[in-house]
Image (tube, grey):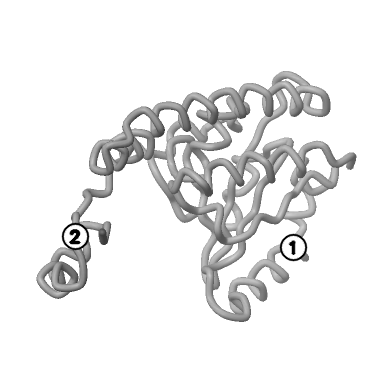
């Protein structure tokens, strides 16, 4: 069986010649997407069991994080692109992992970011979080050199150096693969967040 996204619908005829093909919508809720896949494969119980295990995992992760993160400490997830800085909201991809699943406290104003918003360097102090997760660029072969150059420039500014997370060594660089709503990615992202936050500054 071939399971394809709605964006591949145009080649459905070609795919269906290879094997039975199912086109799935990209649902805004990844949990609903997993349940739909479980229904398609007639494995609804396995999907429900996986989600229950994930909830147990995030509950345990919250307990571990609480050993090093004080109540009320705030968080921000940034993505540095070649020509801009992007702030990710609390409902979007890895942001949802941080703020919905792990229930970390978003920095003031982040709840007003609906999805992803580009901001100027001068706006960064408005999101002066205690902890910052940073993803650099796009997942291209060899790394996104232009985005890395932009981060290097940003890191030398007084604005960046004045941020609480920077001054306290609480900026965590994250790999590109975290920006996904696939269940396995969600699970591995939780593991990585725990590792990062258990590190002593």
Say which residue appears at 67% left-offset and 31% top-offset: 74
Picture quadrant of residue 145:
bottom right
Say which residue appears at 60% left-offset and 72% top-offset: 147
- Work out whether residue 16 or residue 110 is closer to the camera in this orientation and state it: 16
Q: Which mark is residue 11?
A: none
177 to 59, vertically: above or below: below
Picture quadrant of residue 134:
bottom right
Question: With 75 as the anchor, is 101 left or right in this view?
Answer: left
Question: With 91 as the anchor, is 152 left or right in this view?
Answer: right
35 to 88, vertically: above or below: above
- Image x and y of residue 173, in percent: 70, 56
User: Callout 1 environment at 10 Å: few (<14), some (14 to 19), or many (20+)?
Assistant: few
The quarter in which the C terminus is drawn is: top right
- Image x and y of residue 139, in percent: 53, 69
Residue pointed to by mark 1: 155
Question: With 13 as the anchor, is 29 left or right in this view?
Answer: right
Say which residue appears at 74% left-offset and 63% top-offset: 155
- Work out whether residue 49 or residue 147 is closer to the camera in this orientation and state it: 49
The quarter in which the N terminus is drawn is: bottom left
Residue pointed to by mark 2: 21
Check disc 1 and report its element: helix, strand or loop.
helix
141 to 200, vertically: above or below: below
Check disc 2 and report its element: helix, strand or loop.
strand
- Image x and y of residue 33, in percent: 31, 40
163 to 52, vertically: above or below: below
């Amino acid at each position: 069986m071939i399971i394809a996204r709605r964006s591949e619908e145009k080649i459905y005829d070609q795919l269906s010649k290879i094997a039975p093909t199912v086109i799935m919508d990209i649902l805004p809720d990844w949990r609903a997407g997993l349940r739909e896949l479980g229904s398609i494969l007639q494995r609804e119980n396995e999907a429900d069991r996986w989600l229950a295990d994930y909830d147990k995992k995030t509950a345990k992760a919250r307990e571990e994080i609480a050993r090093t993160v004080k109540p009320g400490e705030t968080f921000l997830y940034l993505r540095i692109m070649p020509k801009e800085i992007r702030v990710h909201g609390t409902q979007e991809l890895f942001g949802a992992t941080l703020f919905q699943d792990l229930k970390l406290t978003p920095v003031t104003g982040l709840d007003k970011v609906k999805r992803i918003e580009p901001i100027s360097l001068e706006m960064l102090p408005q999101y002066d979080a205690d902890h910052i997760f940073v993803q650099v660029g796009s997942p291209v072969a060899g790394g996104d050199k232009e985005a890395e150059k932009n981060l290097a420039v940003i890191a030398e500014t007084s604005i960046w150096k004045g941020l609480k997370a920077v001054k306290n060594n609480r900026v965590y660089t994250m790999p590109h693969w975290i920006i996904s709503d696939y269940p396995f990615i969600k699970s591995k992202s939780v593991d990585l967040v725990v590792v990062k936050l258990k590190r002593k500054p």
